[in-house]
């Protein structure tokens, strides 16, 4: 048993980092995941960081985004009277946490264990997210705000989740419906891959994840996640055919409709508007929640950045306003140079996905890349609270699989979906 401890430690570590992303606020604006990530890094930096083998196509442009944002702090920094300067610590956390997560994963997890670690992480994400969907269902009948408040904020005052709940948008432990939508989308895609050989389990998990995504009425999930999950399920080599898939999905939908659940849910009308938007709104304006129409506040921010500091933006502190997309965030922090670097980041994620040799894994990674790129139009999908740690742990592990020698990346799986290697993998 003692000899197995070194092998289990990497799996336990990535599992801890992933589970911590679902934890509550500890004090003020400090989240459980921040303590887990930065605390673990502080302990392991002297021991393991120098053993990491980075996936340079991804980490280099992300580090470039951080570097350019730091240049914006060098006097004379460009600021605009139209907006107040943002919080330096918040901007630093958004950009450095992904770097630290990647380096932790790459320095602790052996390449030979990357697929096993990914299976552990996927299971944690999928089951906790499904449980959150069930929690949201309970929230339609019982007021859970007292229990959920520590997960929404550590400060006094009305939270985004409370304001969203007044419109019937229930996001469970997540403070923002869009943030919840990112996690639901990632979890749904991972569920298809992780439990592809267990059709009943897959269907049950996807039902809970889908209901949770609909209850928070996240356009990121409903318009992006659900279509990609269904296509992924259709194209995957799952343990049941397309006819069984359609029958099972129809059965679940019919059961939910027959239960009268949606009729008792106050957010049903808000969800129904996605099918029949207001006639006085354009489609782009409605489905982007006003983010991408010509008169949107986000477009006004773009204009301010281009006028004041088009190349480098306003620096790491940014400005005091919610960033409604990854492109708003990077333009404010890094200007046009940052937008180019972010394009390279998403290109690197797609490139990594195509390097994976195992068909099911490559398919999952490709749909994950599509989802994250699409979600970036409605939320900073790579830096948003909670979702950031979840996304970057998964991406870091996928990069490790993609970096393995070609022979070592050829594998088959057992009945549980875990890898059975046909050639000996080389550990770093």
Image: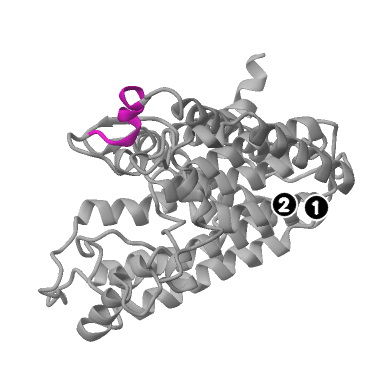
Residue 27, given in percent of the width and then of the height, sits at: 23, 30
Element at badge 1? helix
Up-down relation of residue 203 to residue 66 (above or below): above
Q: Main secondary structure of the magenta part?
A: helix
Residue nearer the viewer, 204 or 58: 204
Residue 277 % position (x, y): 49, 63
User: Is 153 a magenta residue?
Assistant: yes
- The secondary element bearing badge 2 is classed as helix
Task: Say which of 355 and 218 sits in front.
Answer: 218
How far apart, in angstroms, are the residues tagged by discs 2 and 1?
6 Å
- For residue 358, say whether it is visible: no
Foreground pick, 66 / 187: 187
- Residue 264: x and y in percent read 50, 32
Q: Which mark is residue 234?
A: 1
Is residue 245 shown above or below 199?
Answer: below
Contact (Cβ within 8 Å) of mark 2 with mark 1: yes
Which residue is at 54% across, 33% downward? 133
Instruction: Magenta stretch: give its range.
Output: 145-154
Residue 223 image offset from top left, x and y in percent: 57, 58
Q: Which mark is residue 128?
A: none
Task: Tell me the crowding category of disc 1: few under 14, some 14 to 19, or many 20 or more residues within 10 angstroms, Cα based.
Answer: some
Residue sitting at x 63%, y 41%: 110
């Amino acid at each position: 048993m003692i000899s197995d401890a070194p092998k289990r430690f990497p799996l336990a570590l990535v599992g801890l980092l992933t589970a911590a992303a679902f934890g509550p606020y500890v004090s003020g604006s400090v989240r459980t995941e921040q303590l887990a990530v930065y605390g673990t890094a502080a302990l392991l930096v002297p021991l393991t960081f120098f053993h990491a083998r980075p996936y340079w196509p991804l980490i280099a442009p992300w580090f470039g985004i951080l570097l350019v944002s730091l240049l914006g702090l060098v006097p004379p920094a460009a600021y605009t009277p139209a907006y107040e300067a943002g919080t330096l610590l918040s901007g630093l956390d958004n950009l450095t946490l992904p770097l630290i997560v990647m380096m932790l994963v790459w320095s602790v997890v052996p390449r030979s264990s990357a697929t096993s670690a990914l299976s552990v992480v996927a299971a944690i994400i999928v089951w906790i997210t499904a449980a959150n969907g069930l929690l949201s269902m309970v929230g339609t009948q019982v007021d859970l705000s007292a229990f959920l408040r520590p997960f929404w904020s550590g400060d006094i005052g009305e939270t985004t989740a409370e304001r969203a709940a007044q419109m019937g948008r229930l996001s469970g432990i997540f403070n923002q419906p869009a943030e919840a939508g990112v996690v639901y989308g990632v979890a749904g895609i991972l569920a298809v891959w992780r439990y592809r050989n267990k059709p009943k389990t897959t269907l049950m998990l996807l039902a809970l994840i889908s209901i949770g995504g609909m209850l928070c009425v996240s356009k990121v999930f409903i318009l992006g996640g659900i279509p990609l999950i269904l296509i992924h399920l259709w194209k995957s080599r799952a343990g049941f055919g397309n006819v069984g898939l359609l029958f099972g999905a129809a059965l679940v939908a019919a059961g939910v409709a027959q239960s009268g659940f949606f009729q008792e849910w106050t957010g049903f009308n808000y969800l129904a508007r996605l099918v029949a938007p207001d006639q006085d709104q354009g489609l782009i304006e409605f489905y982007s929640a006003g983010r991408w129409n010509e008169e949107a506040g986000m477009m006004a921010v773009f204009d301010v950045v281009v006028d004041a500091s088009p190349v480098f933006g306003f620096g790491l502190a940014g400005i005091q306003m919610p960033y409604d997309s990854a492109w708003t965030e990077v333009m404010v922090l890094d200007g046009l140079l940052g937008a180019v670097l972010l394009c390279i980041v998403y290109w690197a994620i797609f490139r990594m996905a195509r390097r994976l040799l195992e068909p099911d894994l490559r398919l999952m990674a490709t749909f994950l890349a599509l989802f994250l790129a699409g979600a970036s139009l409605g939320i900073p999908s790579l830096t948003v609270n909670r979702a950031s740690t979840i996304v970057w742990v998964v991406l870091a592990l996928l990069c490790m699989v993609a970096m393995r020698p070609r022979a070592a990346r050829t594998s088959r799986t057992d009945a549980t979906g875990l890898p059975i290697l046909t050639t000996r993998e080389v550990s770093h």
